[in-house]
Amino acid sequence: MKIFLLEDDKSLQSGLELKLTKEGHQVTSADTVASARQKVDGTFDMAILDLNLPDGSGIDICRILQKKSVPPHILILTSNDTETDIVMGYEMGADDYMTKPFSLSVLLSKVNVVKRRIEQKSQDKSKTTIFDIATQTIIIRGQTVALTHNEWRLFYVLWQNAGQTLTKEQLLVKLWDIDGDFVDANTLAVNIRRLREKVEENPSNPTIIENIRGIGYRLNKPPGVTP
């Protein structure tokens, strides 16, 4: 994971950075609000922020991180175990907090929980197929698939009739009706093959664009599909 660490205690900062790096994380560190502002332009999976700093509060950086398109998981470190500090942290978007002095093993456990959640989301995303009709985009197994004009026309017709078997004749008529261009049976077969090569995990054994022997084709929405 990419972790942003804001801590003004040099020994604590170096200790945390060393341990997190050994655990396989990429750590970006800062010890003041001013230096942190210059280093948080990138994308981070998690941020560990000290509240009490020489030139301000970690809450200032928390606000900046919360404005990102994908905010990181934010863990607040505070020396003051007061309700006000804790509530303020949560109100500014923090996900968790720890009071100093804290157990390093507990902090690492919290980091590992975040890592597992991110890995699970990544796995879920790789299994999701997104068909965006508005932008003519297909994202399948986490990859954006580029379609030619004819491939998209064919896919769009199949999508509109997902779950239904369309005969070759029906497809030819529908494709002709879209913008007046004639599409013959050979062109249809070629585009079905090319479309399968792009969207099927195993084109020789298609599960998305299914061949209904002697009749035509049917588009099956894969598990996790979103329109």
Image: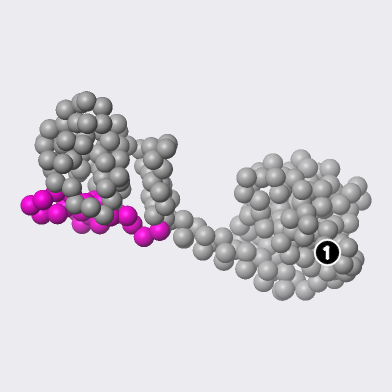
Q: Is residue 182 magenta?
A: no
Which residue does the image show at 62% across and 64% down from the upper left? Answer: 114
Q: Using a 10 Å C-alpha cutoff, classify the residue at mark 1 as few (fewer than 14 neighbours), some (14 to 19) or many (20 or more).
A: some
Q: From the viewer's perspective, tell me whether residue 162 is left or right of residue 90.
A: left
Which residue does the image show at 39% across and 54% down from the upper left? Answer: 225
Q: From the viewer's perspective, tell me whether residue 134 is left or right of residue 208.
A: right
Q: From the viewer's perspective, tell me whether residue 167 is left or right of residue 207.
A: left
Front-lying residue, 191 or 136? 136
Q: Position of residue 112 (x, y in %)?
A: 63, 68
Front-lying residue, 21 or 184? 184
Which residue does the image show at 66% across and 54% down from the upper left? Answer: 72
Which residue does the image show at 26% across and 31% down from the upper left? Answer: 178
Please state the extent of the stretch shown in magenta in the rendering: 201-224
Q: Is residue 217 magenta?
A: yes
Front-lying residue, 125 or 37? 125
- On the question of residue 208 being in view, the answer is no
Q: Label 1: which residue?
A: 86
Q: Position of residue 190 (x, y in %)?
A: 17, 38
Q: Position of residue 56 (x, y in %)?
A: 89, 49
